[in-house]
């Protein structure tokens, strides 16, 4: 899952490259062969080594993502998701007049997670792209933000997958009541252009892919 840098169960850092020589395990859209073989520098992934534990914030994010994956969430229309973000942001005090205070929310996320942790989760942030980092505009029927950023914002606003799921359900009911033509999409629908990206992942990816024995 994009942005996850820690094992949700053990709290250890997830390795993306050799800790000795920084040779990557993954490049050009494919895993390198022979991950159980010695690296060119002599390091071996299966041999006992000193464990490196991730920060509390990284583990909190990993636990949240795993909890999202474990839930049987339906696809949600992007208008429902955006409204859910706005409503929760206003409840948390991130307001600017009658609008969501994206600058206040952004500052709060930076204070909570730090630039270092956010850079690990969000590659655009690491590259210095921080203007309009939080935006609810849409492109091709989706909110114009990458998946990892959606998840980080959701964690910061709602605190848990359970509360996020509950708020989505409540917002869906409110939207349906206000506009009878808006309905939750069927879980097996192949139409995904308006679906929340992380919910699409819930349906497509096995939860076992993010756990360790």
Image: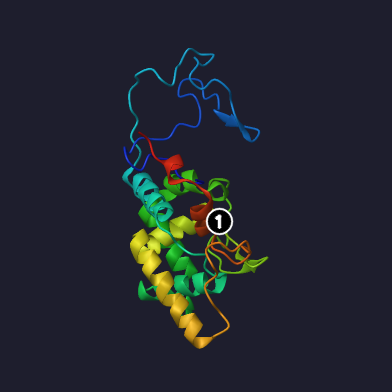
**x and y percentages locating residue 5 in the rendered image:** 43, 41
Q: Name the side, left or right, on which 175 lies relative to 28.
A: left
Regarding residue 162, the answer to whether it shows in the image is yes
Q: Quadrant of the C terminus?
A: top left
Above-or-below relation of 64 to 104:
above
Residue furthest out toward the front? 188
**x and y percentages locating residue 128 in the rendered image:** 57, 49
Residue at image coords 31%, 45%: 56
Residue at image coords 45%, 44%: 4
Along the line of sight, the residue nearer the viewer: 189 or 71: 189
Q: Which residue is mark 1?
A: 130
**x and y percentages locating residue 109 in the rendered image:** 41, 58
**x and y percentages locating residue 13 in the rendered image:** 39, 35
Q: Secondary structure at mark 1?
A: loop
Residue 19 occupies quadrant? top left
Residue at image coords 50%, 32%: 16
Image mark count? 1
Regarding residue 98, the answer to whether it shows in the image is no
Coloring scheme used: rainbow
Residue at image coords 51%, 22%: 35
Above-or-below relation of 176 to 39:
below
The local crowd at label 1, few if under 14, some if 14 to 19, many if 20 or more residues have their Cα within 10 Å, is: few
């Amino acid at each position: 899952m994009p942005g996850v840098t820690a094992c949700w169960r053990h709290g250890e850092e997830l390795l993306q490259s050799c800790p000795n020589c920084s040779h990557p395990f993954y490049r050009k859209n494919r895993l390198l062969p022979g991950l159980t073989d010695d690296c060119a520098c002599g390091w071996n992934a299966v041999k006992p080594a000193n464990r490196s534990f991730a920060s509390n914030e990284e583990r909190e994010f990993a636990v949240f993502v795993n909890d999202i994956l474990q839930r049987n969430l339906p696809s949600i229309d992007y208008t429902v998701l955006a409204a859910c973000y706005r409503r929760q942001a206003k409840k948390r005090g991130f307001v600017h007049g009658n609008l969501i205070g994206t600058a206040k929310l952004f500052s709060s996320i930076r204070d909570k997670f730090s630039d270092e942790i956010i850079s690990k989760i969000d590659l655009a942030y690491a590259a210095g792209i921080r203007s309009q980092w939080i935006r609810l505009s849409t492109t091709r029927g989706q909110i114009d933000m990458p998946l990892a950023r959606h998840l980080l914002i959701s964690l910061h606003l709602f605190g848990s997958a359970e509360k996020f799921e509950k708020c989505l359900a409540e917002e869906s009911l409110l939207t349906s009541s206000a506009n009878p033509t808006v309905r939750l999409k069927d879980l097996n629908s192949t139409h995904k252009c308006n679906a929340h990206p992380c919910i699409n992942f819930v349906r497509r990816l096995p939860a076992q892919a993010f756990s360790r024995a």
